[in-house]
Image (tube, rainbow, N blue to C red):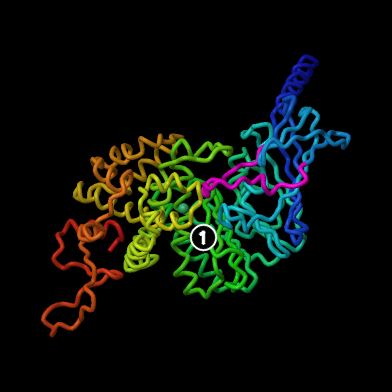
Amino acid sequence: MNSRQLVLSSIFLFLLASTVAARPSIKFTVDIRNTKSHMVHVTLVPSGFKKGNASYQMPIWAPGAYSVTGYGRYIRNFKAADINGYELPVKQLDSNRWEIKSGTTVQEIDYDVLDSHKDTTSLYFAMANMDTSLFFANATCLFGYYDDNKTAPAQVEYQKPVDWKLACALPPSSKGYVQDTNATFQNTTFYAKDYDVLADAPILSAPGLVTKSFKEGPAIYDVVLASNIAFGSAKMDSLTEYLRKIVHAETDFFHETPYDHYTFEIVAPSLTHMPSMAQGALEHWNSSDYLLGNFGWSMFKGAYLPIFSHEFFHLWNVKRIHSNLLGPFDYTKRVMTTSLWMAEGITEYYAHTLLSRYGIIGPGGFFGGGVEQWRKEMEYSPEAAKTKSLEELSIDESGFDLEEALLFYSKGPLVALALDIEIRNKTSNKKSLDDVMLALNNDAKHGKTFKEDQLIHLVEKYSGVDLTDFYDHYIKGNDSLPLDKYLAMMGLQKSAEGESEADNGTSKPKEHLGPFDVDPNAPPLATAIRKGIVGK
Ligand SMILES: [Zn+2]
């Protein structure tokens, strides 16, 4: 190296160092060693931020949960200090936002986060549960964003009891994931490329965390489960095998695996230790979290396979395919989306159809545990909720009304089924809702979101079917869905009450699918439509 090269190299290194130093980033430390106090301590060190007064903003809602919760309500003892440890003046502007004078001198911010899992504005899996032998947190409970900058990368380090395992879907390296099916779940440092990624990766840690990892296609899957009673290895093996089948079905359906790593985080206590009666789950970018009961395998499988299938389908439908209101997110305003009939209704529909189509449960399960169950839930929903269309119920999701949600998750998938039948019937079964989902996913791969009022036109474009009437009646409008008509278009009819199988042996016994009879005189198109939907 000659002297001229040395000078140029020094200039280059200086410029490189200044560029690196100038890029804002945050380092979080979360101390979970004292969860029996129902509280954890968070420290953040910002670097590279330049503004005079700095701000810290906690989200008011969480992606997937939609309800306005205001996560700042669970923050206590918010303090900022300079490099010498002197406390800086902090003003709390509202329950979710703080302002720090002399932002350029901020060295460290500290606060406590309280347990929030009993909050009535949202569901368990969108909140935080801190107890003697369990730490679970949706990341929106722990982290805010600094200086209104949601693009700054973050490093998070957890300080945990040595005998606890810990799972988080964030990569353990700034370079990405490690392909490891023998993970010990002792890693405590994770990286997020921006706030959206950080806020969408929940954390589960416990001393007796049951874990199993598997590889399917190009990706690694971790299954981690916390319970107060044993979740035996045979049951864990069965669960993992069924999760593998679901993963196979849905990655095959979309013809892609758009991630390297996926984590199923499950809290499954005994019924007497349920922290909330509202069981269920929440989808994330490359993980999902669950509150389920630790039942025997047969009951666990029957009750929860569709929930796993639902959350995994969200990986595409809403995490990737979504309106411009659902990403990039504005965490400071209530989200007013009319498109959840698609995000939730179509997801719930496919959660059940794909289980049948890929032979994970029989088609009778789709018609009994899906269609008939949705019909009953829709019928028994409160009258006030029944006055609202799917688009109105979608907007109300941010208001968190469990009775309305019950209707939304029953009417939604039934309307999705009817929409699929409508498309298949009008195209002689040459096109289906599958074509629409694949085309929308193709748009999403190219970074496209859709405008809310364009959604139905995109469904029309990708199916080639005019759906104006259908949309006006059953999605924008609130006409009652003629389910019998749609069952007939699949070659099915309701079983007659008290009908006897015995008819003197003069005709063949009827074939049943769940609570419905297969019509032996159905036209071939109806049979083809049914086979297209459930695979049989
Ligand atoms: Zn959902």
Q: Is residue 173 visible?
A: no
Assess whether residue 422 is covered by the magenta stretch: no
Asked whether, in this view, residue 366 is left or right of residue 79, the answer is left
Q: Position of residue 460 (x, y in %)?
A: 28, 40
Pick whichever, 385 or 140, lies toward us. Answer: 385
Q: Quadrant of residue 455?
A: top left
Asked whether, in this view, residue 355 is left or right of residue 20, the answer is left
Using the image, determine if residue 510 lies above or below residue 209.
Answer: below
Q: Position of residue 423 (x, y in %)?
A: 25, 48
Residue at 71% from the left image edge and 48% from the top image edge: 189
Figure label count: 1
Assess whether residue 77 is covered by the magenta stretch: yes
Residue range in magenta is 57-78
Image quadrant where one finds the N terminus: top right
Pick whichever, 19 or 340, lies toward us. Answer: 340
Q: Which residue is mark 1?
A: 280
Q: Is residue 218 visible?
A: yes
Q: Position of residue 37 (x, y in %)?
A: 76, 59
Number of residues whose C-alpha sits closer than 10 Å to that of mark 1, classed few (under 14), some (14–19) or many (20 or more): some
Residue at 38% from the left image edge and 45% from the top image edge: 391
